[in-house]
Image (spheres, grey):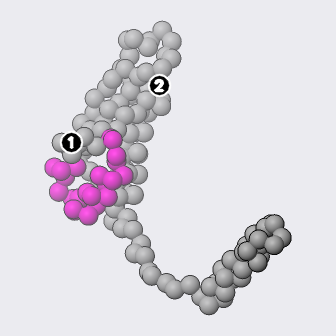
């Protein structure tokens, strides 16, 4: 299930990018801050919203607004596309329900291998002892 946010729910704020930028570094606002209100979006159910909260981490503020910053490219268009792609990837990852864990028992052979390994480790430690102590 792919979640596609409504473009009206997205807010783009253009800011100055950090790092080296040459002569335009203090003049051009090419970095993008994408804001997406997760609580106001009705297509996201509670389970997906909870997984999105866990995946977003510090990028989700206390008001439930997901803030993604993109400044990889030198143009606003490139950074806007990058931010949208990252949002789409995050929503896709959150929409995938985790596979339920199925409890299993160890096989008889694996239990025997484990016990054999323990026996060998104990034998090695017995060989390291000084002769005549607690034998």
Report the residue marked by disc 1.
62
Which contiguous range is marked in magenta? Answer: 37-59
Whether the magenta-drawn stretch holds residue 47 is answered as: yes
Closer to us: 6 or 120: 120
Label 2 sits on a secondary structure element that is loop
Q: Where is residue 127 in the image (x, y as percent from the top left)?
A: 81, 71
Q: Can residue 61 be seen in this view?
A: yes
Q: In which quarter of the image is residue 15?
A: top left
Q: In this view, does 10 lie to the left or right of 124?
A: left
Which disc, if any, is residue 111? none
Please report contact status of discs 2 and 1: CB closer than 8 Å, yes or no: no
How dense is the environment of label 2, judged by Cα within 10 Å: few (below 14), some, or many (20 and up)?
some
Front: mark 2 or 1: 1
Dominant secondary structure (helix, strand or loop) of the stretch shown in magenta: helix
- On screen, residue 87 versus residue 102, left or right, reads left
Q: Farthest top residue? A: 23
What residue does disc 2 label? 74
Viewport quadrant of the N terminus: bottom left
Residue 100 sits above or below residue 33 on the image: below
User: Vertical placement of 2 versus 39: above or below?
Assistant: below
Which mark is first along the chain, 1 or 2?
1
Q: Which residue is drawn at 73% across and 74% down?
A: 134
Residue 102 counted in the magenta span:
no
Q: Is mark 1 on a helix, strand or loop?
A: loop
Left or right: residue 61 versus residue 58 is: left
| Residue 117 visible, this orientation | no
Distance of label 2 from label 1 (alpha carbons):
31 Å
Looking at the picture, how far across and down is residue 111, in whole percent?
Answer: 62, 85
Q: Residue at x 25, y 40 (%)?
A: 61
Q: Number of numbered discs present?
A: 2
Which residue is at the far bottom? Answer: 108
């Amino acid at each position: 299930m792919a979640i596609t946010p409504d473009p009206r729910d997205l807010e783009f704020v253009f800011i100055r990018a950090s790092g080296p930028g040459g002569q335009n570094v203090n003049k051009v606002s090419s970095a993008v801050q994408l804001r997406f209100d997760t609580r106001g979006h009705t297509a996201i159910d509670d389970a997906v919203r909870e997984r999105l909260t866990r995946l977003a981490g510090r990028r989700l503020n206390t008001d439930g607004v997901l803030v993604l910053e993109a400044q990889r490219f030198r143009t606003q268009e490139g950074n806007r596309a990058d931010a949208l792609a990252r949002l789409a990837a995050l929503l896709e990852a959150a929409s995938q329900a985790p596979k339920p864990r199925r409890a299993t028992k160890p096989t008889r052979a694996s239990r025997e291998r484990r016990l054999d390994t323990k026996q060998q480790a104990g034998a090695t430690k017995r060989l390291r002892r000084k002769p005549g102590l607690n034998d």
